[in-house]
Amino acid sequence: MTTLSERLARRRREEEGGRPLEVVPDDAEPQERLDIQIPAGPPQERTGLETLADVAGRQPTSAVRAPDPALITMKGDIHQELVNRFAGQLDLNDRHEVRQTIANLVDEFLRSEERVIGPRERDTLIDSLLDDVLGLGPLETLLRDPGINEVMINNYKKVYIELSSGEIIDSPVVFESERQLRQVIDRIVSRMGRRVDESQPMVDARLPDGSRVNVVLPPVVTKGATMSIRKFVHQRLSVDDMLRSKSATQSIMDYIAAAVKTRLTIIVSGGTSSGKTTLLNSISSFIPADERIVTIEEAAELQLGQENVIGMEHRPPNMEGLGEISIRELVRNALRMRPDRVIVGETRGPEAIDMLQAMNTGHEGSLSTIHSNSPVDVVSRLETLILMGGVELPQKAITKQIASALDIIVQVERVRGGARRIVSVTEVLGQDERDEIRFQEIFTYRQVGVNDEGATRGYHTATGVQSAFLEHFATRGAKLDESIFQPTPEPPWEDLY
């Protein structure tokens, strides 16, 4: 077997006009430093890019520029040498051993090439190789960053991230090549016993920490593999957190708390990434501790604080297309488990009819979320989902089921600027003489305008309509102060949010 030095020497002879690796001392100017996590690209586009911490508004760690292609070549050579020498020998569960082996190979290369680089650059190179071997390559930097909520990969050289503030920015961390991106995708999907290729170019998967992953490959997409990762939030946001972030007011949360405690059925409605699951997690804290709860989810995200909780999760089909356990099957089974509450993480299919029947047959106080643009649209969405499931019921009967099952719809929205707000709390009052469902809005978020940065500014207020459930609350020991239903005067501009 040829040594690392011999292989690299041969490569240099084969590469005519190859540019040698530049090295810099630790005290060089920031723009002269190298960081292999920063994408290759035209110098005029990438020179002077800040680190991710800088872009996110946190304390900067260092300034970086595009990596020299020779650095990427060196990284590839060391990685291949690691495979050639130690494949099947390293204990991949021993991170320290793997890192030490990589460090030894890096030092051997530097000695053989008579290169001298600073300790910071050496550690960056070692960490990047370690991420490639044990983790998800460049994604590890983004997944470890607590200030990032979502990673959206349009292609290997174009990655966007959503910060905790809701702002979406162009990430300085990208992939070195389409091949590297595909390797990461294969690693993610294979862990779940799934596959993704030209014959099956779309797949949903999950990382070990619970983060949700969606992958789409060509020919369905035209500019290379695409992946989005919604990071799992390990720390549930409390009601106090939502109040501090102005997602709601104390009056709104008092009303929702009374509704949950007195077993009214609540649907949280909103668009993608509007904060539906986050809100569902928060309001579930109002469920009394002595109740038995069964949760049903596509991917486990709910983090309930109660003790008597049973969580069930949809199982996708295996590589042969067999073994799937649908949400609808889980809902049916949950009703046999003597639940006091059934929480469906998201209603998105034919399980809607089973959930409504459960709500109408003794399982009051159930909670769920649904994709919808407004409280009124929730009814149309549920009707569509039920009909798509092949249920042979007349439209009138379906509407009656919905009107009887639902009590409150909480609409959430991601407003301009990225903030997430409860924008409407609406009561469902049954059907009128024309068999149409009646609604009344109790609380709303009034958008007044936008600030200089284009972010929405407004305020929460009651609509002035008294709740139809006041007697229901009072008879079940959750009497509310009727003053919370009085409208709030519009505050001055500086107090809007």
Image (cartoon, rainbow, N blue to C red):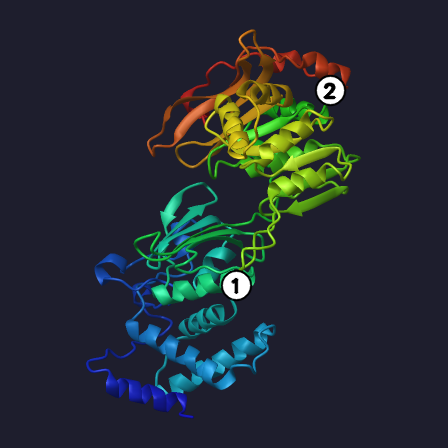
Instruction: Determine whether, in the image, residue 234 is placed left or right of residue 50.
Output: right
Q: Quadrant of the C terminus?
A: top left
The percent coordinates of residue 254 (x first, y second) are 65, 23
Residue drawn at the location 35% of the way across and 62% of the way down? 38
Crowding around mark 1 (Cα neighbors within 10 Å: few <14, some 14 to 19, many 20+) is few
Q: Is residue 335 above or below residue 4?
A: above
The percent coordinates of residue 332 (x first, y second) are 68, 38
Q: Amino acid at mark 1?
A: Ser
Can residue 169 be seen here?
Answer: yes
**Nearest to N terminus: mark 2 or mark 1:** 1
Residue marked by disc 1: 190
Q: Is residue 187 above or below residue 349?
A: below
Q: Secondary structure at mark 1?
A: helix
Residue drawn at the location 60% of the way across and 11% of the way down? 466
Q: Quadrant of the N terminus?
A: bottom left
The percent coordinates of residue 411 (x first, y second) are 52, 27
Hey, which residue is sitting farthest right in the picture?
Answer: 290
Instruction: Determine whether, in the image, residue 260 is placed left or right of residue 160.
Output: right
Q: Are marks 2 and 1 in contact (CB under 8 Å)?
A: no
Q: Secondary structure at mark 2?
A: loop
Q: Is residue 323 above or below residue 126?
A: above
Hey, which residue is sitting farthest left in the picture?
Answer: 17
Exactly how many numbered labels are in the figure? 2
The percent coordinates of residue 259 (x first, y second) are 67, 23
Q: Which mark is residue 478?
A: 2
Q: CA distance from mark 2 to mark 1?
A: 50 Å
Crowding around mark 2 (Cα neighbors within 10 Å: few <14, some 14 to 19, many 20+) is some
